[in-house]
């Protein structure tokens, strides 16, 4: 650990400059496509998230479930008003909208961003596309924008989200107690992150897993996703 002129420990020098801003963009993979979220996606997303999925998918979200399409459309529109957020619609290759994910808390000066507001309809959950969507967002953040840190946060009681974060390669960093009040209840927030130093190993794990040869004729994985050093 380096010391300054006063003998105090300080952080390692950083040879890094901010990359391009993280702006709305289309990300295309083999099993899904992410597009800047717009009005053209609302009808399909309402069907996927509010009609064809159980209301329990909204338990740990800041709002929802929604009684009607107008309320859902208003919530989608609201995402565009949140500072430092880039909302994306997740589509199947045929263009069917099946989910939402956003970049948020984007801090270009320090090279950090978070993935959040993740809403997966039943048709997307536990599919290759569900995993590839997260990989596409990570790869864009690290390889194109050049972030140094990519975060995932969730209610500490949301076990499915915590398991997903670990599977996707995020490292658990702790719990912020009494962090948020939503839907009239407390949220202790679990923090996870991937750093630029972690990314090469995690990326290689995704690339192995997403290779078409890793799936049988029924689309079932042959080997599980491994995003940690073995």
Image: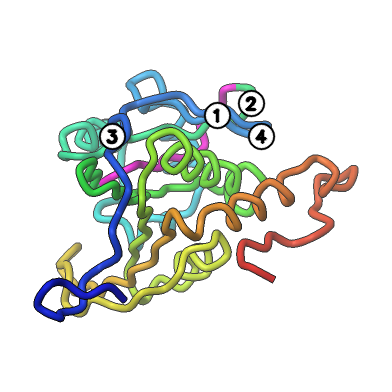
**Label 4: how many Cα within 10 Å (few below 14, some 14–19, many 20+):** some
- Lateral position of residue 38 relative to residue 121, left or right: left
- Camera-side residue of 217 and 203: 203
Picture disc at residue 31: 4
Residue 33 got which mark?
1
The one nearer the camera, 114 or 38, is 114
Q: CA gap, disc 1 to disc 3?
A: 18 Å
The mark found on residue 93 in the picture is 2
The residue drawn where x is 38% and y is 53% is 150
Compared across the picture, whether 89 is left or right of 208 comes to left
Badge 2 marks a residue whose secondary structure is loop
| Image coordinates for residue 69, horizontal then vertical, percent | 32, 33
Asked if labels 4 and 2 touch by Cβ distance under 8 angstroms, the answer is yes
Q: Earlier in the sequence, mark 3 or mark 2?
A: 3
Most extreme residue toward the right, as rendered? 217
Disc 4 is placed on an element classified as loop
Which marked residue is nearer to the observer: mark 3 or mark 4? Answer: 4
* Residue appearing at x 64%, y 68% in the figure: 229
Front of the two marks 3 and 2: 2
Residue 138, given in percent of the width and then of the height, sits at 47, 45
Q: Quadrant of residue 85?
A: top left
Magenta segment boundaries in residue numbering:
95-104
Above or below for 8 versus 208: below
Q: Is residue 96 magenta?
A: yes
Q: Measure the alpha-carbon separation of dots 3 and 4.
A: 24 Å
Label ID, residue 76: 3
Residue at 83% of width from left, 47% of height from top? Answer: 215
Quarter of the image with the C terminus is: bottom right
Q: Residues within 10 Å of mark 2 (few under 14, many from 20)?
A: some
Task: Report the number of numbered marks.
Answer: 4
């Amino acid at each position: 650990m380096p010391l300054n002129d006063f003998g105090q420990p300080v952080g390692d020098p950083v040879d890094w400059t901010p990359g391009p801003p993280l702006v709305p963009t289309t990300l295309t993979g083999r099993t899904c496509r992410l597009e800047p979220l717009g009005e053209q996606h609302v009808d399909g997303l309402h069907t996927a998230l509010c009609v064809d999925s159980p209301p329990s998918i909204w338990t740990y979200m800041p709002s929802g479930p929604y009684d009607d399409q107008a309320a859902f459309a208003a919530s989608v529109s609201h995402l565009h008003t949140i500072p430092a957020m880039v909302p994306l619609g997740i589509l199947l290759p045929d263009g069917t909208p099946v989910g939402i994910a956003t970049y948020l808390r984007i801090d270009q000066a320090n090279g950090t961003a978070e993935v959040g507001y993740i809403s997966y309809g039943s048709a997307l959950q536990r599919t290759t596309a569900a995993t590839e969507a997260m990989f596409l967002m990570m790869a864009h953040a690290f390889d194109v924008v050049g972030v140094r840190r990519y975060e995932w946060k969730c209610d500490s009681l949301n076990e499915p989200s915590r398991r997903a974060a670990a599977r996707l390669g995020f490292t658990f960093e702790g719990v912020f107690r009494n962090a948020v009040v939503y839907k009239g209840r407390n949220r202790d927030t679990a923090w996870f992150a991937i750093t630029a130093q972690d990314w090469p190993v995690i990326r290689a794990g995704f690339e192995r897993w997403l290779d078409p040869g890793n799936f049988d004729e029924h689309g079932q994985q042959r080997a599980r996703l491994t995003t940690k050093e073995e």
